[in-house]
Amino acid sequence: MPAAHRGIVSRRGPQPTGSYPHAHVHGDMVWVTAQAGRDPGSGELVEGGMAGQMDRAISNLEAILEECGSSLDRVVRTQIMYTDPSDVAAMDEVYARRFTAPLPVRTSWGVKFLAAEPGIELVRVQIDCVAAVG
Amino acid sequence: MSSDPTITIKEAPEPRGPYVHARQHGGLVYVTAQIGRDPHTGDFVKGGFEAEFNQAIDNLEAILKAAGSSLDRVVKAQIEFVEEKDLDAMNRIYGERFHDPLPARTSFGAAFLWKGAKVQIDCIATLD
């Protein structure tokens, strides 16, 4: 890839399950792959429904951002996809606790399904972001 | 951070969650997805899909203006809508509201949107 572009895979995020890194850095911005509530060690989805998954997904984002020289307070924009309209309150509660001013802009919407493997609890939410580096 | 990069205004519906209306970075302004809520009452406007989509674009326009940008400086728009039957109305209204140079656009059907919204639209625009 061109020298100005860098793909980042962090040991602190769950290992990617497809042909993508955790993040792509270019210039003073980092673009982070959508994260689900997977444990970075085991790759398994964490327990606790929406609240547990959202908290873990944001921790994964945070770890990846830090590896790239960024942080949650430098996130410019997030996108959230979720599967159940009744999860909104739990989602917002965790999000409000984890993101502090200056807050990013946000777009969220409901989807039919998110990637999951047989035999485990369904992925209820995923979140990606664009953030400033440096 | 030297100065607050975020913008939240009274001329668009108050954020109903932990986010701002817009945030600037690197010569661009990023805008939170807007739905068809009246900026003063916070309620959905009446009149179905067309009224909601027009109001959502009004909200986007107000936020862009406050940020020092405008609809004709949008580089990318993203639209989520719920009912496939609303596609033609979406395209028609979008065509009435956005003019050359048109932004790149991604639109798709969502399973559902917040509180039964029929459509939402966000964007990234330049500040030059």
Image: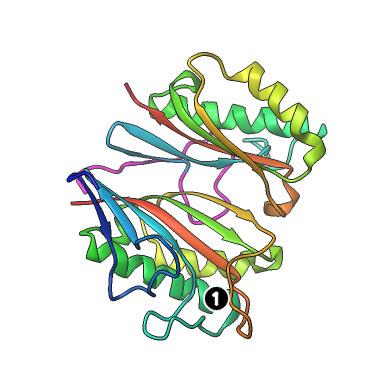
The residue located at (53%, 57%) in the rendering is A80
> What main secondary structure does the magenta stretch of the protein show?
loop
Give the camera-side residue of B21 and B91: B91
Give the magenta range.
B1-20
Q: Which residue is mark 1?
A: A51
Asked if residue A48 lies left or right of residue A104, the reply is: right
Residue at (57, 58) in percent of width and height? A81
* Residue A22 on image: x %, y %: 35, 63
Work out whether A22 lies above or below A5: below
- B68, A69: nearer the viewer: A69
Residue A121 at x, y percent in the picture: 62, 81
Specify whether A70 is left or right of B98: left
Q: Residue at x 46, y 22 (%)?
A: B70
* Image location (x, y in percent) of residue A17: 45, 70
What coloring was used for the rendering? rainbow
Secondary structure, mark 1, is helix
Residue at coordinates 60% horizontally, 84% vertically from top-left?
A120
Quarter assignment of residue A124: bottom right
The amino acid marked with disc number 1 is Ala
Report if residue B8 lies within the magenta region: yes
The local crowd at label 1, few if under 14, some if 14 to 19, many if 20 or more residues have their Cα within 10 Å, is many
Q: Is residue B15 left or right of residue A105?
A: right
Total numbered labels placed on residues in the image: 1
- Residue toward you, A74 or B38: A74
